[in-house]
Amino acid sequence: RKEVEQDPGPFNVPEGATVAFNCTYSNSASQSFFWYRQDCRKEPKLLMSVYSSGNEDGRFTAQLNRASQYISLLIRDSKLSDSATYLCVPLGRGSTLGRLYFGRGTQLTVWP
Amino acid sequence: DVKVTQSSRYLVKRTGEKVFLECVQDMDHENMFWYRQDPGLGLRLIYFSYDVKMKEKGDIPEGYSVSREKKERFSLILESASTNQTSMYLCASSFEGGYGYTFGSGTRLTVV
């Protein structure tokens, strides 16, 4: 079973829309999670960290459901600049402490 | 800001050549990582290092080796480059435990 699974999309939404991505993870011991965004042909950059049940930063809300082992990212009032690939990333535990496990990402395109 | 610098943005090498990809970080991070990223496959971990002179195999170490002689520098070596190693290579570093994970801007390697 893969460490993390995401719906690859693509999600195509108009400006101003609300869009949500889900991500499931397999390691129940994972305590920390991150959402990264990656623009085309660029490196991934940290968008949000999730340590407890959730986190909110402006238009972005991340929620964690430990019982079901999934994390979600909600983007409200989508902007053209939100077009990117979003990567859900649990932090490794135990022997893999410090290692991040990257999903394949969910592609978002926001159109005018 | 943490800076992770990769020595080359674009590189073209011939089959059979020995290739060195260099990565330097300036924030005294303990952990360093090498990934490759290919369309549809996401980020795949090649090797990582938790300390100077220490290395651990990632998911796809075959055909690669690494060197970490100094804390700030982590080198990826392709002993005999092959065309299937044409890819985007991304270096990352983080504090012990995985926090502060930051990527370099990547090296796009083409093996002809």
Image: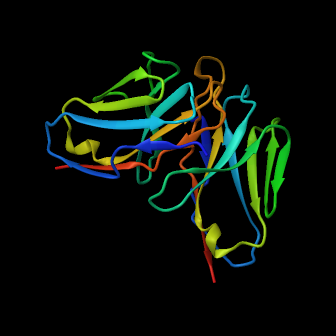
> Can you say which quadrant of the picture contains the C terminus of chain A?
bottom right
A21 is higher (above) or lower (below) than A91: below
Residue A75 position (above or below residue A5): below
The residue shown at (63%, 30%) is B98
Number of dots carrying numbers: 0
Question: Which residue reaches farthest bottom?
Answer: A112
Towards the viewer: B58 or A81: A81
Judge left or right: residue A91 versus residue B33: right
The structure residue drawn at horizontal position 44% and vertical position 53%, both measured from the top left corner, is B40
Residue B54, x across and y down, in percent = 45, 16
In terms of image quadrants, where is residue B95? Answer: top right
Residue A1 visible from this viewpoint? no
Query: By what rule are the colours in the image chosen?
Result: rainbow
Closer to the camera in the image, B61 or B70: B70
Q: Is residue A41 visible?
A: yes
Give the image quarter of residue A70.
top right
Quadrant where the N terminus of chain A sits is top right
Image location (x, y in percent) of residue B97: 65, 25
Q: Residue at x 57, y 34 (%)?
A: B27
Instruction: Give the percent coordinates (x, y) of residue A22.
Output: 70, 52
* Residue A40 position in % (x across, y down): 48, 62
Among all residues in the image, which is located at the extreme right?
A53
Say left or right for B62 vs B29: left
